[in-house]
Image (cartoon, helix red, strand yellow):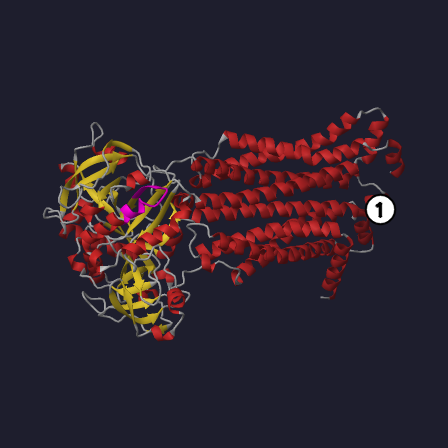
Amino acid sequence: MQTLFQDVRFALRLLRKSPGFTLVAVLTLAAGIGATSAIFTVVNAVLLHPLPYREPNRLANIWNDYGEHGQSLPAVSGPDFLDYRDRSRLLEFAAASGFTASLTGDGQPEQVRAANVTSNFFPLLGIPVERGRQFKTGEDIPHGPTLALLSHRLWQRRYGADPGIVGRAIRVQANLFTVVGILPESFELLLPPEAFQIEDADLWVPMRGNLRQIPRNLTGLSVIARVKPGVSFAQAQQEMDGIAGQLRAEHLVHRTSGLRIRVVPYQHDVVKGVQPALLALLAAVGLLLLIACANVANLLLARSEGRSRETSVRVALGATFGRLVRQALTESLILAVIGGALGIALASAGLRVLVWLHPPGLPRLAEIGLDGSSLAFTAGACLLTALLFGLFPAFQSSRTGHSERLKGTRLTASLDRHRAQNALIGAEIALSVVLLIGAGLLLRSFAALEQVRPGFRPESALTFEVSPTAQRFLGPEGTINFFDALEQKLATIPGVDRVGSISKLPFTGSGPQTPYAWDAETAQKWETISADWRWITPGWLDAVGARLVAGRWINQQDDPRHPPVIVVDELLAKRAWPNGDAVGKRLLLSGFGSFPADRDGRLWAEVVGVVAHVRSHDLRRDVREQIYISAAQLGGRRMSVVVHSKIPPERLAMAIQQVVRGLDPDVPVAQIRTLDTLVQGARGQARFILQLAGVFGSVGLFLVVVGLYGVISYAAGQRRQEIGVRIALGAQPADIRWMVLSRGLRLGGWGLLTGIAGALALTRFGAGLLYGVRPDDPATYAVVTILVLLVSLAAAYVPARRAMRIEPMSALRNE
């Protein structure tokens, strides 16, 4: 221990004597360790840390699949859910569906997200209540009691955290619900990105509908299951395969569709959308940390050259090889610890910025923060970096040749050290090239994504959600009257030129799907082909600037008194009628509205128009076909309104709220935002990855510049006598400049070639993050090549200028 304390004191004394070296090394390590710790913290919280539920490794999400082109969603019909619950022996099931509720009384009307749940929903997740009680068995029955659980945030925001709210009645829509409990502040319902039947809600009520009366092809429930103790997911999947076979044998709708039931581990389902991006970022910061280690190792090598005579004296006085290595490693560890402490501060600040930015699609954002796992990882990173950047210089400075140094002969040792420095700076450049190419590919990909038109014009359009509550507006006809009146009044606002409404806005979730068929053959394979369906008012397609390809829009005549009609997109039209005009043709759909259906609950609707495909799910690809139905014929209730204007849309919010209050003072206006915000949100993940990759690439390039400058400057200083002799013998300044610059170019070229080879091997693993650009994109590689060569020249330029000015006599006299 005494020897260790001596090593620590000696290392601290050396670091104090070289403040410039210490500052550069600490800042370099802090950048690498801080970035790595921050991204690991995100990966740990989102991907690795168990979900905040009881025994989350036993939770599963239930998916129903209907063939290659049919519906595949975490969505289940009411009768199917009951059959799963009754027939399974290895799984416990709970179900939920979402809706939007208007809270009136106790202040201004407010629209909140709400959910119907089975009575065992929260016990299955293992979520207790903070106050009151949960729903009891038997309260989730048709026409059961009107009870409610409140989220902690709603309890605080609307009811001022009043404990007396438990047991009181609140007005939801036009009904009174008795509050029986308050959920914990920490509770959040995490869902896979495909879920559309439910969102994390503020108001939870028992499921009071008759699930047996729901058609089996109407998939309106999200179903969560818990695998019983001692049961594997493989066993659970095997049982559900058997139940799917039974349902196919018993029900024609499932036999023709080829129903399959998937039991998907819940955590995997929640995070699968962000997993590739986070792992790619973790790999990027790993490269950045290696660059930082190589940079500091180069600094230590350069410093050890200046201390080579001191090291030789210590060897002559009896210092062993192990003692010298231990002393060098002690210094490295101190640097790593200081750098790690500063890195933790940088990571903490970076994580706060990340949470503030709220990148779209990143789940569990509230759980992201430095914790014991993050600190343990940082400690491990400090130890690893100390070894990575400390061992190599330690061995180099402790090698043989000490007697030659004492005699003044240091050629062999200097050459060895120069080779080591060259190898390290080459590795730095190679790693930086990989980072820069990755960032360049993401930049090209994002630029391509920015040019994608989603099939509509989002500019100058404001959207909001509204759901009528007044008695005169309830029921299908009353709802349509409300939206007709609303759109007419909105159209009179100065500057507004177009208004329309839709059941599900683009880029706000999956939304419902409908099976469809166009002939006898596809009708026999019912449910194997499906499309997104949306109900719209006559003005919506025009309000968002959708492109009409053939036929006409939905219009005011498309109401329950006229035959059912639909508008389809180009994808569906080309698939169903590749050699003909779709307008005037008919599609077989699930029954809707009050129109008579066949014994299987289906009806034929006429295609009156074809529109360009709207990318509602993913800007990068066409996900599935689309069918638009008149809201008047379907009888939809809650809708999102789009107001297109000639003035900045943000200035319309107050006027819109006044119009809505004039129609029904109890109707809240919710989710006011521009349509362009939704489109930008669809680019959010790509933008987030690009920004971080750009930061990491820039930091890596800066470290390369510092390292390359240091190596070339040091090498030029070591060759001072040689340069003096060359100048004395007639060498021109341009010759000296090229001699130094060529060294920088050689180092840059070697690292560049190695980095390009590494990038070609590695970037193909991240091809899924790219759009419109290949992993071996020549333009990106060319730009990075030119950039690295220019940076190599720039880093070598100052040492070259200094070498040109060496006075021959001064250089020879100093030697």
- Residue 457 in the image, given as x and y percentages of width and height: 36, 38
Check disc 1 and report the residue beneath it. Answer: 406
Instruction: Name the residue type under label 1.
Output: Leu
User: Total of numbered circles in the picture?
Assistant: 1
Between residues 612 and 56, which one lies in front from this camera angle? Answer: 612
Q: Residues within 10 Å of mark 1 (few under 14, many from 20)?
A: some
- Which corner quadrant of the image does residue 434 belong to? top right
- The image shows residue 487 at horizontal and vertical percentages of 28, 46
Q: Name the one closer to the observer, 654 or 135.
A: 654
Residue occupying image coordinates x 52% and y 62% = 371
Q: Is residue 779 magenta?
A: no
Which residue range is magenta in the image? 486-499
* Image coordinates for residue 600, horizontal then vertical, percent: 12, 48
Residue at x 64%, y 43% (from the top left corner): 703
The question of residue 491 being in magenta is answered with yes
Task: Decide if residue 589 is on the left or right side of residue 169.
Answer: left
Can residue 227 be seen in the rendering of this structure? Answer: no
Q: Is residue 240 above or below residue 494?
A: below
